[in-house]
Image (cartoon, coloured by chain):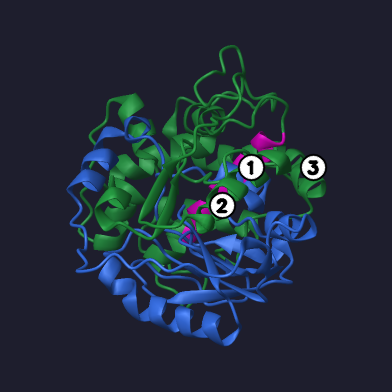
Chain colours: A blue, B green
Amino acid sequence: MTRLEDIPEGEREMLKALPLPSFDTTPFVKGNSLSQRRVSILSTAALQKRTDKVFYRGEAGYRVIPGGTDPNDIIMAHGSVNFDRSGFQQDLNVCFPLERLHDLVKEGFIGSVADFHYTVQGGLPPDRNEGAARQIAGLMKREGVDTVLLVPI
Amino acid sequence: MHTEGIKPPRALWVPFELGRPLGLPNDAEFQKRVLRACLGLLDAESGPVLEDYLEDIPAGSSEYDFTGMSCPIGLHPVPSNDSELTNSLVQEMGQIAPWYELAVDQRKRTTVGISELDILDAARFLIDFIEDPSSPSPRPEMEVGPMLKHTCEDLKAFYSEAASAQPGMSSSLAVENWLWNETVLGKVLWNFREEHVDDSDTYIGYLAKRGLIPDRQIQFKGAPVF
């Protein structure tokens, strides 16, 4: 998310014209207290491990980033050139805040960090990501994750 | 705007530029404040909740406040004769390399590598394609178009990582302006765009129109945005 006025005109008009999905309900549930939450990251930055198959243009799949992955093994395959990459190059946490989540565990702010995190390639019509989203949700539930930190790029 | 329409259970709007959702690189306290505000929405009693995060990046680190800054990497001037560009690219990369290695040493990581080519091989493939668009992909399992995209992303990352390791060059726009206006690589990619913007190959045409150069740089130049 950013200020619309900070986005170049062409990209801004394209974003404003995108069709949005509509939902019949607005689900909202309360859960455990923050200090008991288990948090997993879902990034739309098409991050992946070096050894993963590279996201191709328009791909609606997902990749898994195990929590112990060396930051040097994480690269970005997103096709868009209209967002900054220099921040990611300087510090992975600026778009994939795994170390910061561990900091918050040490502070007792949250309970734990999941063993697995997930990435998709944003910029696609949302319904195309539904299959990946459902699979990721299932995997998170199996791991006992009760909080997803969705980090758009 | 989209979040208002989609109405997820909880969302924190942040004022940071695209690509930096946590705001500032290398500032753990800043990043943790953003995260605490975001995760704190889980305590809401009812929703949907859409809250604004009001702390902007500190004055002086604004993306648009880099008057007087210039990249300290001293490069030879970009040749005005296009026929010299391809040779100059490899020479320029030799000048960039020590700064790139310094950046990798400081950060203990690099984001270069999506093409799986050595960086000089990546440059050679780009040069080969410019000189002869029928040049084969250096990785037979990957078609030329995607191979070029990954190659160019690696080259841009190589330059950007080197430049952003310099004092005063953490701003995305400073790095971007340098790459697209002051380097041979930038000139080569501008030429690529001009040459292939109407290409009948849809992937190469996409690269030229939207897949290599940021829209804002195209607008700065007054060139048509597709």
* Residue name at image x 27 percent, y 39 percent: A12
Left or right, B99 with respect to A94, comes to right
Of tags 2 and 1, the one toward the viewer is: 2
Separation of marks 3 and 1 at Cα, in angstroms = 30 Å
Query: Tag 1's secondary structure?
Result: helix
Characterize the local packing of mark 1: few (<14), some (14-19) or many (20 or more) Cα atoms within 10 angstroms: some
Q: Which one is in front, A138 or B139?
A: A138
Residue B135 appearing in the image = no
Earlier in the chain: of badge 2 and badge 1, it is 1
Q: Which one is in front, A85 or A26?
A: A26
> Magenta segment, which residues?
B150-165
Inspect the magenta stretch and tell me whether residue B158 lies in it: yes
Characterize the local packing of mark 2: few (<14), some (14-19) or many (20 or more) Cα atoms within 10 angstroms: some
Which x, y percent locates residue B87? Answer: 56, 41
Q: Chain of mark 1?
A: B
Q: Amino acid at mark 3?
A: Leu
* Residue pointed to by mark 3: B102
Earlier in the chain: of badge 3 and badge 1, it is 1
* Residue pointed to by mark 1: B33
Q: Are marks 3 and 1 on the same chain?
A: yes
Residue B40's tag is 2
The secondary structure that dominates the magenta segment is: helix
